[in-house]
Image (tube, coloured by chain):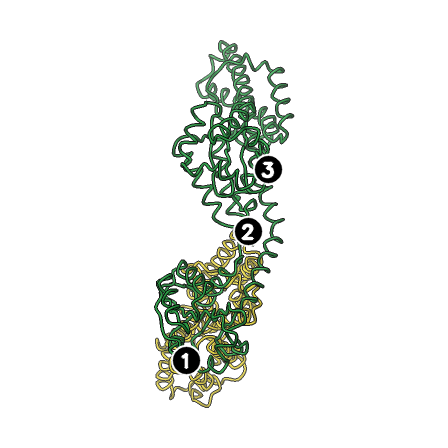
Chain colours: A green, B yellow
Amino acid sequence: MRLFAVGVSHRTTPIELRERVDFARAGVAPALAGLAARNVVREMVVLSTCNRAEIYAAADSDDAVEGVVAFFSEYHQVEAAQLCEHLCIRHGADAARHLFRVAAGLDSLVVGEPQILGQVKTAYAAAGDAHYTGSLLNRLFHTAFAAGKRVRSETGLGEGAISVSYAAIALARKIFGELKGLRVVVLGSGEMAKLTGVHLRAQGVENITIASRTRSAAERAAAHIQAQVVDWAGRDEAMLRADILVTATGAPEVVLTRGQVARVMRARRERPLFIIDIAVPRDVDAGAANIEQVFLYNIDDLQGIVHDNLARRTAELALADAIVEEETHRFVSWMQSRDVIPTVVALRQRFEAIRRAELSRLNHKLSGLPPEALAQVDHVTKLIVEKLLLTPTEQLKAVSDDGLAASYSDALNRLFSLEDAPAGPVEEPQSLPRRRAGSLPGDPS
Amino acid sequence: MRLLPLLFYSAAAAAYGAHFAWRNVRVGRLATALLGGGLLSHTFLIGMQTVQAGHAPLVGTTAAVSAFVWVLGLAYLYIELSSDERSMGVFVAPLLVALGAIPALDPGLTARPAVLQSPLFTIHVVSMLFAYASFALACVLGITYVLLFKEIKEKDLGVFYARLPSLGVLDVMNGRAVAVGWIFLTVGIVIGGIWAAQVQHSPDPRAQAMSIADPKILIALVCWGVYSFALYARRAIGWSGRRAAWMSAIGFAIVLLNFLPVGYFLTKSHNF
């Protein structure tokens, strides 16, 4: 069985073309059904996100790739020549490695973003539910999930906010824990104030109060984010109850002095206050940062965090790549061992046939033995066959080169005339018992 | 056999350190398993000593240290398993190793004098051990709070920011640990006082030395004062956060001072 992946991504394809080949627009189910109807592949998964449209498939031969490319072009009504300029076709280990990188967020626009793993799972579930996956893609995708999880848990790739808003939200979580019950006061009613309110609301903050010098502007902003409004004069009182204070007024001078913040803090009995000053010029006197239990971050501080996080993520890439390589190697080994299994089974059938033939040839000589001794002879001959086959089986399954594995299989077929081997029920070679050399069950040793 | 818990605790400390550094889930589970192994072998050891002596091994400072390590380990393991938060292990496990080394080197098991045969003595010691374990956890929570606070306040987000739970969680847990410890400490001191009054006329000179002038008793009362103030300040003055964290660190430093140097060298009333 041959594994391959055909698709486009943000790395190779401009957005104009990505929009045209988006499988998700009409749902992946029709795409899966359409490809299945062509009968070119045995297993398939369609992965479609805003940054990629890819088909992972398993077929009997590499010729199936052409059929998938033709489907890609015809399904989306894009000229094959135009599509082929951007299309990436990956085979075997490369296809597996690519999927593992995708699942781990290494191929994402924002490296390390976590949503992609969920999207890969959804794509796999859609194909699996419709019975378009088999043992090869099942194993491939489960290994991809494992690789994605390992990269998240064993590296710092997904850590640290990489946008100013999320840096502020992550800080708030680190100061207070849960955001849900927190009270937020926003000073200002401009776009930045509204945007911050929207972000906080999306994170589950329910209690947002807006104060602005212009009451009508505050009311408009409040309607946008379902917040309450207080007069500018009432801001100090609102701050008494706040956990987070966002300042984005656009005023040319400081609107909150150190003294004002200190007074508020005394009245709050030193309850922690997280001040996010996203205004330029700054709204809050920098000296307020020295007050106990005040955590003051301005726009530069937040951008500094984002910058550090991006640098840290880059530093983790090598570690994440190593995990992907390890999982790729493991998967490819499994895939290759799977390719040689028919040869191994045929070899075992051949040996078993010889064993049975020899036992039946000696039947007249052994017929005088008691049943226990006959069973022992049967058992010992089986063990001899197993021991003879153990090392060749392991060696064959361990071959990591496709060509070499095919040569070995071919050699075994010729040497033992496996094509002529009689078919019969023979247990999976994986179940061969591993015993100490020279010891047999029932041996006195 | 008596070295086995220490070996487990040491291995757990190393594994917690590795987990803190690399945040590998498997190493974290290994650390928990090693700590569990240490506590299991410690339980077995305490059980054996109980069977051997015919009473719980609580007589003498060394035996009390051993029991303290056991209670602290159990309390930490309970918190870790119930909160699925392993980052404190790197601070607690070295404490278990440092204190666990004392009974491992010399178990210091002594016969129980007649004066200690009252159930009040057992209640007193068990209450004090629970109090000390709570204060140890409060101290660890306080130290981690201060480390994380410093990073956030100074805008230098690093090791602790990436690993520790939020300041809010650490502060709440610190407050609870101090409150639980204070209740046990109060019970321990009150029961100890009643028991001391009962044995005042015993011929044992140590029983006669049970007075507020004895450094062990005096410092225990100072501890009670410090933690009472910490609780009052948190509720009445709003001393939570960093101030509460420092208070619990100072409180536990006094506990350790009373437990080890005073317990071994200075007390005339608690040197059984």
Quadrant position of residue A241: bottom left
User: Is residue B18 visible from the viewing direction of this image?
Assistant: yes
Q: Which residue is mark 1?
A: A269
Q: Residue at x 45, y 43 (%)?
A: A119
Q: Which numbered dot is residue A154?
A: 2
- The residue closer to the viewer here, A399 or B258, is A399
Say which element carries label 2.
helix
Query: Within 10 angstroms of label 3, few (less than 14), some, or many (20 or more) residues?
Result: some
Query: Within 10 angstroms of label 1, few (less than 14), some, or many (20 or more) residues?
Result: some
* Earlier-in-chain disc, 2 versus 1: 2
Q: Chain of mark 2?
A: A
Task: Give the image location of residue A391, x and y in percent.
Answer: 60, 28
Task: Give the image location of residue A261, x and y in percent.
Answer: 47, 79
Task: Give the image location of residue A267, x and y in percent.
Answer: 40, 82
Q: CA distance from mark 2 to mark 1?
A: 41 Å
Amino acid beneath label 2: Glu
Amino acid beneath label 3: His
- The residue closer to the viewer here, A233 or B253, is A233
Q: Which numbered dot is residue A329?
A: 3
Q: Chain of mark 3?
A: A
Say which element carries label 1.
loop
Task: Give the image location of residue A115, x and y in percent.
Answer: 47, 48
